[in-house]
Image: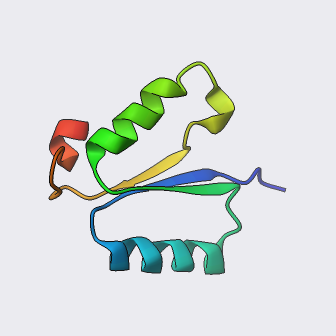
């Protein structure tokens, strides 16, 4: 049996966040879904949890066009 993944969604669109979360949960049972509204928020989370590998996401779905820090700056 596969280990459940931690999935991260970085997108400023609340409808996309909701539909992505819903679709992921309906197809796959993730360990956790992390949702961030911009790249800066996601970067802060990742840097705070660098020493705790079990809380870092396994997969990141990243929007390119966002305010504050866009997807290219995040990468």
* Picture layout, residue 27 above or below residue 74: below
* Picture layout, residue 8 above or below residue 40: below
The residue sitting at 45% across, 77% down in the picture is 18
Q: Quadrant of residue 25?
A: bottom right
Number of marks in the image? 0
**Which sits in the foreground, 57 or 17?**
17
Image x and y of residue 42, in percent:
38, 42
Q: Is residue 9 visible?
A: yes
Q: Quadrant of residue 40?
A: top left
Image x and y of residue 55, in percent:
63, 37
Left or right: residue 33 versus residue 48 is: right
**Which sits in the foreground, 59 or 65?**
65
* Picture layout, residue 15 above or below residue 17: below
- The N terminus sits in image quarter: bottom right
The residue sitting at 63% across, 81% down in the picture is 26
Image x and y of residue 8, in percent:
48, 53
The residue sitting at 66% across, 70% down in the picture is 28
């Amino acid at each position: 049996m596969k280990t459940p993944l931690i999935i991260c969604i970085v997108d400023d669109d609340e409808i996309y966040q909701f539909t992505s979360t819903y679709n992921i949960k309906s197809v796959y049972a993730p360990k956790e879904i992390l949702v961030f509204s911009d790249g800066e928020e996601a970067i802060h989370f990742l840097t705070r949890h660098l020493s705790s590998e079990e809380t870092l996401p396994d997969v990141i779905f990243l929007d390119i066009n966002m305010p504050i820090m866009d997807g290219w700056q995040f990468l």
